[in-house]
Amino acid sequence: MSKLSPKAEEVLESLWVAVEELDRVACLLTDLDLTPGDETLRELEALAYTEIRGERLYLRKEGRHEAEMTVRRHRLAERLMMDILDIQGEEGNEQACEFEHLLHQGVDTKICTLLNHPTTCPHGKPIPPGACCDEARRAGEVGVVPLTELSSGQSGEIAYLAANDDKKMQKLMSMGVLPGNRLEVIQTYPTYIFKVGHSQFAVDDALAREIHIRQR
Amino acid sequence: MSQQQNALPKIILVGNPNVGKSVLFNVLTGAYTTVSNYPGTSVEVSRGQCEIDGQNYQVLDTPGMYSILPITEEERVARKILLEETPHRVVHVIDARNIERMLPMTMQLIEAGLPVVLVVNILDEAKRLGMELDLAKLQQRLNVPVIGAVMRRRQGLEELRHALSPAPVTQQGAAYDSVLEAAIGRITDTLNGSYRLDKRALALLLMQRDEEVAALVGKIEGENTVAVEETVRTVIFEKRSDLNLQISLERKRICRQALDGVVQQKVLNGLPWSERLSRWTMKPATGIPILLLVLYFGLYRFVGGFGAGTVVDYLEGHLFEGYINPGVIDFVSQHVQATWLWELLVGEYGLWTLGVRYAVALILPIVGTFFLVFSLLEDTGYFPRLAMLVDRLFKMIGLSGRAVIPIVLGFGCDTMATMVTRTLETRRERIISTILLALAIPCSAQLGVILGLLSGVPGALMVWLCSMVFIFLLIGFLSSKIMPGESPMFYMEIPPLRLPQLRNVLVKTLTRMQSYFLEIFPLFLLASVLLWAGKMSGALQGLVSLLLPVISAIGLPGEATSAFIFGFFRRDFGAAGLYQLQTAGLLSPVQLTVAAVTMTLFVPCIAQFLMMKKERGLKVSAGIFMFVSVFAFSAGWLLNILLLATGLLQ
């Protein structure tokens, strides 16, 4: 499959958002800054991704998957810019817009895995899952969940601590919250209470989220 | 004396919070430091002496620390001792039940080259949990003296004393895996100076970005510091992915090896009843009713009803009014001619009639009953459970559940509580709790008098209670919005519920009463003298007329003014002044309630202010002082208008 032009990708993206998230049936050509004879439109129509009826541009069934993937790449790019490279605000948005067009041939899968298969973009909109996300979910069924996902009475082995704050990590570790130790949840509200060895500890949501448990 | 004491060889007690360091300190020295069943009771270093085989030692009891790398203020205090003192022995006290979790710190201490003696305490409870420990084997592996103990019952004390006297042999720390050792080696190679602690331990602390150790190294290394810092930075960068974790896991591995075959765990069936009760106290559905019961019986019935009612009535109404006072007044009248002296001794603000009578007959029974309840609850281990229950609520006012301990202690004595705020982790939390203690938390003496004062008027107590709760939450909420800083995190060890030991509770209550009495009694006398001088010179009249417009503005009779001026000397002193006004029938229910609310909010006593200044600095504490004064009268003014407008309490 030949690679779409950046402009065509932008059009697909806008269409997908309009149809999937704003519940519209189509977009006005003028809203997309397009005129009927445009290069971009010809490119999309040649692939049967879109269709013009009157003033409006429609997303065809054939183009839906490709459109979804462009949205996914855009939102992954936003995550990468803002979370990892720490480029915030308008600058982050602009960089993401340019960067998304480079995320082809498996690069998006790599980035998605690097970002640990995020489900939402920094603006809170959902990121359409790719094949890698589904696979990770299937593999993760046995796997590791934050302490907050356990209910009282459940227990497991501490898999890892996710805190990025050194002090928090050291505190947890000095309380015996170390990978490999068994942990039993006693209570989850109003604070989490768990038992490690013969000691009980109370921690709040924020700390509980950092403790990841492998259930058995 | 301190000169002489400093020359003595030192024994330093260290260990996790709530493992019995203070109990050990008490049995070693025969002194008394407060022992409780919650972590962080000792916030300061206690010093005492003991004699073993004819040699005197100075014993230092440090605040609890989880690791040699400090995070909280109290851990920093404890670690500072290890950095600065040259001990004869370092006694590491651990809880037998959690030996696996606590042994890593023993390793750290040994690694630091400290002369460690390990005390495995609380063996009795470990046995009850089905644990068997082979401590001889552990001693062999660690190569330092290991003593099994139940210090509460003095078991193991003699063995410990024997182990303490001989000169220690310095031990080598256990080896980590080769990668970590290589990193440690690179840093130790750059350290040229001579240190109290072993260089391997210093290297590990530097790798974990310990700022105090970095500063110490900077001071000793001089020009070489740059090279050290460079190496440390390189190592940190190379191991950036999981340095802390790697160190912890290595320590855990070494401890597992040391404990292999030492601990046998039998399987027990069912939950012990204390564990069941513990869970009831922690679940909101049962925990909140339990809390209300504790408050009702502990505070309202026992402190308010029995302490401030029965005991005060007997001491004040029966003993003082009926027997002691007439006798004393007669005696003084016969022997003293000068009016001024008569006034000073038994006049309206006399040393005896005001100072001694208030302190002994009014305040002491109330404070005493409060401290009794507090000590009892403390020893059961109830407070950490309370902390976890209120954590969500406290988060809204910018505090973590941990702050419940200074706040509850504030109901006993705000001065003590202000000192305990240092166990909170962020400056923001410390300031917010200091404000709340100064403003909305009445101390036990004041609380007792106010409960006694308001219980006669139906509804007044409710209005007072609602006002205080509302103001507490409102000011907490506002200050958490105004104060910059991230919201605190909450974590706390929940100790097992224990049946309090009567002796410990009594000794603790008496010690607290004694220190309270020693602190307030001179102030009561001083206050009497100042008030007397004021009355004689007319200055009091001046001060009264100065404050009079404010008092009138909040709808109170002019006579109440002097009670507010008393309040400056002691909070409870002012409340007691109100008590007298009410007995004389000078206050309507509305006035009584307004006066009680204003008085509760009004400026902290002198002692609390001095403690605030010590803990938070002059600027912050002066700011709090101003705010509290203005706020108290504004709130009183508003409440007066509200009560009059709504016709409540009339």
Image (cartoon, rainbow, N blue to C red):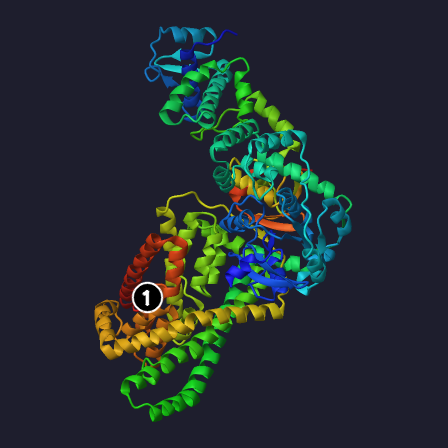
Q: Which residue is at the front of the view, B143 or A144? A: B143
Q: Position of residue A178 (x, y in %)?
A: 63, 40
Judged left or right of residue B322, residue B169 is right
For the C terminus of chain B, give its image quadrant.
Answer: bottom left
* Residue A24 position by quadrant: top left
Residue B66 is situated, as x and y percent measured from the top left of the image, at 58, 48
- Report the residue at 33% width, 10% height from top: A35
- The residue where tag 1 is placed is B598
Above-or-below relation of A201 to A90: below
Secondary structure at badge 1 equals helix
Amino acid identity at mark 1: Thr
Q: Quadrant of residue B316?
A: bottom left
How packed mark 1 is, by other alpha carbons closer than 10 Å (few <14, some 14-19, many 20 or more), is: many
The furthest residue to the bottom:
B334
List x then y, in percent, for residue B380.
Answer: 60, 62
Residue B574 against residue A73 in the figure, above or below: below
Position above or below: B146 against B573: above
